[in-house]
Every structure is written in C-alpha cells, then in structure tokens.
Image (spheres, helix red, strand yellow):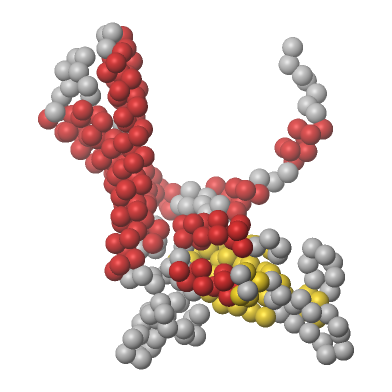
Amino acid sequence: MPDQHPTEETDAAASEPFDAAAREPIDSDIDLRQAGRDRGRGRHDFTILAAISAGGATGAAARYLIGATWPTPSGSFPVSTLAINVLGCALIGVLMVLITELWSRQRLLRPFLGTGVLGGFTTFSTYTVDIQQLVAGTHTGTALLYLALTPIGALLAVWVTATTTRRLVQLEDPMRLTGTAQRLTIIVSDSGHWHHKPLFTEIVHRAHDAGLAGATVLHGVEGFGATSRIHTSRILSLSEDLPVVILIVDSHERIRAFLPQLDELVTEGLVILDDCQVIRYVGTSPDGVGGGHAPRDAPGPDR
C-alpha cells in the first residue's frame, strides 16, 4: 500500500523553490511566471498562436509533399522519413544560432519557424510508427538500423549546423553582442597566482583566447568572504589579500562553454552567473573612428 505520509525530506524538497529553473534563460514568449502579473497578454498570446499555426501548416505541407514524392514501399527502409527528420534537425541548429545571436529582437521568429514550421516538418511520431510496422512485418534488422540511425543523424545534424553557423556568424562580426546576454562575475583574491602570474590575469587572457566579448577587472578596497575575515586596504590595517572582481559579458552559449576553465583556475573564491540586457556595445574601429567594434587585440574603454 502506498505511503500516505510523505517523509520530512520529501516535504522539505517540495517546499524549496526550484532555483535551477529560475536561473535558466526562458523564452519571453512562453514565460509562464509572467502570467499572474500580466493579465493583458491575450492579444500577444493570440499573435504567437497564430504564428505557430501558420508555421505548422507550412511545415506539415512541406513534409507531406516530400513523403508523396518519395513514398516508402512496405517493408523497405523509410528513407524519406529519415531525410525529413535529419533535415529538420539541421535547420533547427541553424535557426537556434541565428535567433539567439543575430535576430534576438524578432519575437515571432522562434514560434513561427521553430515551433511552427520545423515542428510541423519533423515527424518523430511517424518514425515510431515506421519501427512498429517494420517489426510487425518481421523486418527486425531494418527496424533496428532505422531506430539507431535517426537519433544519431538528428543529433549530428544539429551539432554540425549549429557549430558551422556560429562560426560563420563570428567571421562576419566576431564581436557582435546585443540583446539578452549573460554576465559572469568572478571574485578571487589578488594574492592568487597561476604559474607565477596573477590569477585574474590568467582568467582575462583565457577569456580573450576563448573569443569572449570583453572582460573587466575591478580591485576591491574592502570585503570578506568564506573565511569571515575582513580584508581592507586602509593604511592602518595590516590585512592584505584584497578581493578582485572579474566581470565578463557574452552570450549564454559562450559563457557556458568558458565555465569549465574556471573549474581549473578558481579553487577559492566565488563565481556568479546572471542574465543581463546589452543596450550598447561599441568600441573604436580600426581607423580610430568611434562606433565600430574594437579589434580583439586592442584594449579599449569597453574592456
């Protein structure tokens, strides 16, 4: 008989806020946490649903045309369905890079193209039915091959197209940064070193080598941390070991990719991640005229 009295640990876990979800970036089009605070979103929601519906009809029609043009005989390998799903996932990889790094202000692109067109175009339900029919027709070997090839091909397609698109975007404008971004704050001691170099210098150089948009180092004058010992720069105090704050801002993907390097470098200190909105990110162009992006190897006021 099931336990009718949950344990204290279960109650405690249920009462805790889901902080991990709160930290993850949420698409503003579907952020349900805004529902209780914004009662006037009916028209906004209708526009999104209309975009999804129009996109879904377009994607489903394209899928139907491909399936009708290249039908799969009974018992044969479902080449057309595999091609549809792999192609759809490849396009998803391209789209997700473009809407997060180039077209972040176009709020209807994701529901129309992502949820609508590509959601209607890909058909993993047909993939499941195809496997069932192959197994029922004693074509077990073909079913197993199809079962394995589809997820492998889909995941590989997403990775290849997303990686390629991101590199092409960086070649076009390697210092592009606008809209929603993520701020990485690292607090360490100014006495920390890495291979006889200041630790904050190593972090900044690694951020630069990783192609991040910029980094700034701030030297603290007083503070305390996990040791609860106050460090200060006042002349009458004998304390040293002052805090140093490194601020780095870039896209969510670039910041997340950089985090493993901090696991190696930061053995004592504090690392914070929070979302931010980039309003303006400009430096000095190579000809010295303001308004362009600063070259990577030339420090500027935006560093």
Q: Residue at x 33, y 86 (%)?
A: 286
Q: Residue at x 27, y 12 (%)?
A: 139
Give the image location of residue 280, x and y in percent.
45, 77
The residue closer to the viewer here, 17 or 9, is 9
* Quarter placement of the N terminus: top right
**Any part of residue 122 in sight:** no
The residue closer to the viewer here, 291 or 213, is 213
**Any part of residue 48 in sight:** yes
Looking at this rendering, what residue extends furthest in the front direction?
Answer: 196
For residue 105, side relative to residue 249 (left or right):
left
For residue 69, side relative to residue 159 (left or right):
left
Give the image location of residue 151, x and y in percent.
36, 33
For residue 135, side relative to residue 33 (left or right):
left
The residue closer to the viewer here, 266 or 30, is 266
Q: How many marks?
A: 0
Looking at this rendering, what residue extends furthest in the left direction?
Answer: 69
Q: Residue at x 78, y 67 (%)?
A: 225
For residue 266, side relative to residue 170 (left or right):
right
Image quarter of residue 56? top left
Image quarter of residue 53? top left
Image quarter of residue 238? bottom right
| Above-or-below relation of 192 to 141 | below
Give the image location of residue 78, x and y in percent.
23, 24
Q: Residue at x 32, y 90 (%)?
A: 287
